Amino acid sequence: MKLAILSRAPRSYSTQRLRAAAAQRGHEVRVLNTLRFAIDLSGDDPDLQYRGKPLSDYDAILPRIGNSITYFGTAVVRQFEQMDVYTPNTANGISSARDKLRATQILSRHNIAMPETAFVRNRADVRPAIERVGGAPVVIKLLEGTQGIGVILAPEVKVAEAIIETLHSTNQNVLIQRFVSESRGRDIRALVVGDRVVAAMRRTAQGDEFRSNVHRGGSVEPVELSADYEQVAVRSAQIMGLRVAGVDMLEGPDGPLVMEVNSSPGLEGIESATQLDVAGAIIDYIANQVAFPEIDVRQRLSVSTGYGVAELLVHNNGEFVGQKLGDLDLWERDITVLTVHRGTTVIPNPRKGVVLEAGDRLLCFGKIEEMRSMIPERRRRRAKVRKLPPEALPTDPR
């Protein structure tokens, strides 16, 4: 396998370990500076150049995109995807994980437990938002902060209001999040590779510091995760479109609470704590998956006129509840069911004998009009495009 590690820090521990692990396994590996790429869209075949020269062929890339170059870095990763080069972390996945609000929205959509969170912009909405997440003390987070930077614990409501107002005045967007006192300054970092957790550690903050990041003096210890914690970590990474990720979780009173999904997790802390070859596990996974590059399924399946991807919801007391998939005549209507989402469970490639339950979500590919016809309350005739009226703009009353 010919592997490119996209990193601006070739001497960092993580980059050196990944490079060494790949070389030890007989792979050809290079570390490429992400900012030295140029995307060439002028020819018939879109291509990449590196340091002013055409880029040679690679089987896979491993993005280590810094927060400050997220936009350009994800553009480079996206171009590799268009060239059918395998990447464990997609450009969309990296972009979504970097935006704390978007990540929270995506995870909550899939019923991932998280600390109560609010996002507001108007000054009048700040105090009600603080009260909704549980009141003071409250955690304030910058949307695009990393490594604990831009995370503030406000002990009182008035202090929180002042901090948020100050940040808003500098055009900063912030999240307001409940402070989980039960965690006692501890959190868990689970390193997810593919569909399993390969290593996990517990981080504990020092003294009065509530952030447990290792570079802020936090101590680490290896930890064996229960099945619940491991399942939440894997699901969170997969939902975000990341096959290599560090999932940070708080130990809440009712189970794991996901704080963040990191698309470029550091390896030094977790390898030191667990004494496990995490870098090797990442390289082995990429080598096994290199023949199956990530594709934008919706993009690929939407190129045929009249066809597309849609999600159908089985409503409570709806006509589909209790019926088998095979009884819905979906295949006869040129609709293929790709997966059935039932709560936190996914049934891939479901058989015709699967009995539908209320709340099931069917991910389908087929004729758009046929799928629309299966949603009675939204069924409408396609509106005709009318001619422009004589007076396209309203007359000025003045």
Image: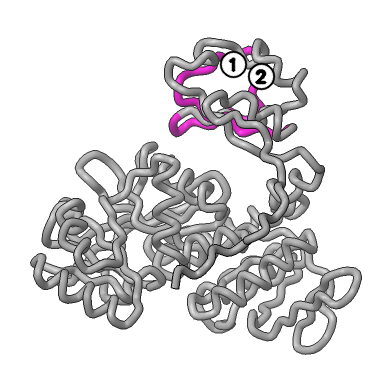
Q: Is residue 21 magenta?
A: no
Report crowding for label 1: few under 14, some 14 to 19, many 20 or more residues within 10 A (C-alpha): some
For the point 44% across and 15% down, which residue is it? 317
Which three-letter amino acid code belongs to the residue tagged 2? Arg
Q: Which mark is residue 92?
A: none
Quadrant of residue 366 in the image? top right
Distance CA(mark 2)–CA(mark 1) = 6 Å
Residue 359 lies in the magenta stretch: yes
Residue 271 image position (x, y, % from top left)? 44, 64
Amino acid on which disc 1 is placed: Val
On-image quarter of the N terminus: bottom right
Disc assigned to residue 354 = 1
State which quadrant residue 268 falls in: bottom left
Q: Residue furthest front?
A: 398
Q: Is residue 121 visible?
A: yes
Identity of the residue drawn at 46% across and 56% down:
191
Height in image: 263 above or below 190?
Answer: below
**Secondary structure under the numbered disc 1 in the rendered image:** loop
Q: Which residue bears the numbered disc 2?
A: 351
Give the quarter of the figure containing the C terminus.
Answer: bottom left
Is 135 on the left or on the right of 3, as rendered? Answer: left
Local crowd size for mark 2, using a 10 Å CA cut-off: few (<14), some (14–19), many (≥20): few
Residue farthest toward the right in the current orientation of the protein:
44
Q: Residue at x 39, y 54 (%)?
A: 104
Query: Which residues, given as a range, are shown in magenta?
Result: 343-366
**Residue 238 coordinates in the image, percent (x, y):** 53, 48
Residues under numbered marks 2 and 1 in contact, where contact means CB atoms less than 8 Å apart? yes
Q: Secondary structure at mark 2?
A: loop
Residue 3 is left or right of residue 263, and the answer is right
